[in-house]
Amino acid sequence: MAETWNKKEREKKKQQQKKEKAEKKAQRKEDAKGKGIDDMMAYLDENGNLSATPPDPKKAKKFKLEDIEIGVPKAADIDPADLIRTGTVTFFNDSKGYGFIKDLKTQESIFVHLNNLLEAVGEKDKVQFEVEMGPKGASAVRVKKATV
């Protein structure tokens, strides 16, 4: 079967690419032979930028191993007293079983459900509560009337 002109051209092109690839590989090997470890080193300067020159030892800073934190720092323990908020019931529907409390500190309106009440509340009652994040936002839990 006779080869077509197009097939010969493709074969020639493929051979040329193989030859160029082999030449590039040989060139990379030659370039790498002359380099030592010092030529491959990179340094960080005091501003965190990469540099080819080693840093000045006079500008070196000493750090304690304990001070280095990798990842998210540990959260401080939360005082349970900080979680308790006070507010006023602005709306409560007994038949539907939900309402809203206006936080006295942040002035935000927080949803409250009948299941999260420790005792019965009505509109304009002063209450103490804790806030938990639910699927639809902030929600008041452990709600009870405030003792003033």
Image (cartoon, rainbow, N blue to C red):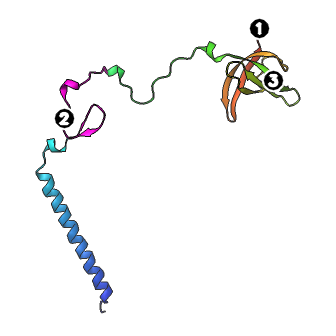
Total marks placed: 3
Find disc 2 in the rendering and name its residue. 54
Q: Earlier in the sequence, mark 1 or mark 3?
A: 3
> Which of the two discs, 1 and 2, labels the residue nearer the N terminus?
2
Q: Nearer the viewer, mark 1 or mark 2?
A: 2
Residue at point 27% right, 31% down?
46
Quarter of the figure that contains the C terminus: top right
For this orientation, the residue located farthest to the left is 34
Q: What amino acid is found at the position of numbered circle 1 in the picture?
A: Thr
The 10 Å Cα crowd at callout 2, few under 14, some 14 to 19, many 20 or more, is few
The amino acid type of the residue labelled 2 equals Pro
> Are circles 1 and 3 on residues that touch, CB within 8 Å?
no
Q: What stretch is highlighted in magenta?
A: 42-64
Disc 1 packing (10 Å; few <14; some 14–19; many ≥20): few
Please report the residue visible at 84 percent of the width from the left and 25 percent of the height from the top. 92
Image marks 1 and 2: residues in contact by CB distance under 8 Å: no
Q: Residue at x 25, y 72 (%)?
A: 17
Is residue 45 one of those drawn in magenta? yes
Q: Where is residue 14 in the image (x, y as percent from the top left)?
A: 27, 75
Sequence-first tag of 2 and 3 = 2
Residue 118 drawn at (x, y percent): 78, 17
Q: Residue 147 carries which label?
A: 1
Check disc 3 and give the amino acid type: Thr
Q: What element carries label 1?
A: loop
Q: Which residue lies furthest to the top in this view?
A: 148
Q: How far apart are marks 1 and 2 (CA)?
A: 67 Å
Residue identifier under label 3: 90
